[in-house]
Amino acid sequence: MDIANEFFSIPSAAECRPQFAFTWRGVQYTWNRLPQGWKHSPTICHGLIQTALEKDDAPEHLQYIDDIITWGNKAEEVFEKGKRVIQILLKAGFAIKKSKVKGPAQEIQFLGIKWQDGRHHVPMDVVNKIATMSPPAKKKETQAFLGLVGFWRMHIPGYSQLVRPLYRVTRKKNYFEYGLEQQQAFEHIKQEIARAVALGPVRTGPAVQNVLYTAAGEPGLTWNLWQKTSGETPCRPLGFWSRGYRGSEAHYTPTEKENLADNEGIRATSEVVGTEASLLLALRLPVLHWMFKGNIPSTHHATSTTWSKWVALIMQRARLGKPNHPGILEEIMDWPEGRDFGALLEGGGSCPRDTTI
């Protein structure tokens, strides 16, 4: 649902009106309602709507400024929740656009993301728009393309490595030289967007297995989160992340790079499944024993402070596990990279078995 004229529904305080004064055709005016275009208007609007919903105990919902979504297991449940939210907003003095009230439905688009069966997809109109884009001829056009596809990077394994040639030509110190390498990267990322997999749904409970694949290769770090529940054969992807090395990270030892990938992965996945969910690390090198020992190896490039942070995060995550159910486990394996993840999903691949260290 969408609120109508949300900014103009909010009166501005009398002491704030002088700052909104303007002159038009020789007559001075000021805004007595929250002006559209003022940088603080969205924040104020979001906060007031949120306060109104919380004050009257609105049912479970998601809100971003004036866009609100509710959900449930049955159409009747969703309808009643939406009806209650509308009543609260009307009582608070807001108006609702009837044309923007959608559902109940099994498929919906919210904040530009397509949601279906608890999973978020790249909308087909976005896929088509990217597919028809012409190769960029300027830095700004390249930046615009990267901004568009970058919003969907969690759907694309190894995204940062794929777009590296394009990012290279956008740097201020570099001339714009669009060559074969850039064109190949441009076409490749368009193909990956076209076959991007849906992510989710995120499930919780003792029957859920969260598997984090991490690796540190020559071009950079990758980590990918998958989830399997009892009775399911294939794992479901929850997100793909990647980034290049920063500063001195490129000079880390192989073990340090794996530690870095593990820590980056744990931080990112904690935002998806929470910090209390059990996590199985599928690694290429046995690194957790270094963490549990708490000893910094004699040969290392990362600072002692960095090592301490790595150890602290791993130990904290391990302690969050429940009795007889450790918070973090490890299995050494040669996991697939790049688009092979898609083959793993389509082919019904299984999550690795639980193996404690």
Image (cartoon, rainbow, N blue to C red):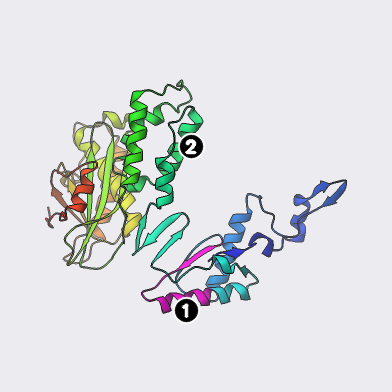
**Residue at the (17%, 67%) spot, across then down:** 231
Near-viewer residue (57 or 326) = 57
Q: Is residue 286 left or right of residue 210?
A: left
- Helix, strand or loop at label 2? It is helix
Q: Which residue is mark 2?
A: 144
Q: Per the image, is 75 magenta?
A: yes
- Quadrant location of residue 215? top left
Q: Is residue 291 left or right of residue 108?
A: left
Taking 9 as reference, is 125 above or below it?
above
* Cα separation between marks 1 and 2: 41 Å
**Residue at the (21%, 57%) spot, across then down:** 235
Near-viewer residue (23 or 273) = 23
Taking 162 as reference, is 106 above or below it?
below
**Residue at the (29%, 62%) spot, across then down:** 276
- Quadrant location of residue 301? top left
**Amino acid identity at mark 2:** Ala
| Residue 81 image position (x, y, % from top left) | 47, 76
Q: Is residue 168 left or right of residue 232?
A: right
Q: Which residue is mark 1?
A: 80
Q: Which residues are magenta?
A: 66-85
Near-viewer residue (134 or 6) = 134
Instruction: Specify few, some or many for label 1: CA neighbours under 10 Å numbering under 14, 14-19, or 20 or more.
Output: some
| Residue 171 image position (x, y, % from top left) | 45, 27
**Amino acid identity at mark 1:** Glu
**Residue 57 visible here:** no
| Residue 279 image position (x, y, % from top left) | 23, 56
Q: How many marks?
A: 2
| Residue 174 image position (x, y, % from top left) | 45, 21
- Compare marks 1 and 2 and give the one earlier in the sequence: 1
Q: Is residue 354 left or right of residue 241?
A: left
- Helix, strand or loop at label 1? It is helix
**Residue 316 visible here:** yes
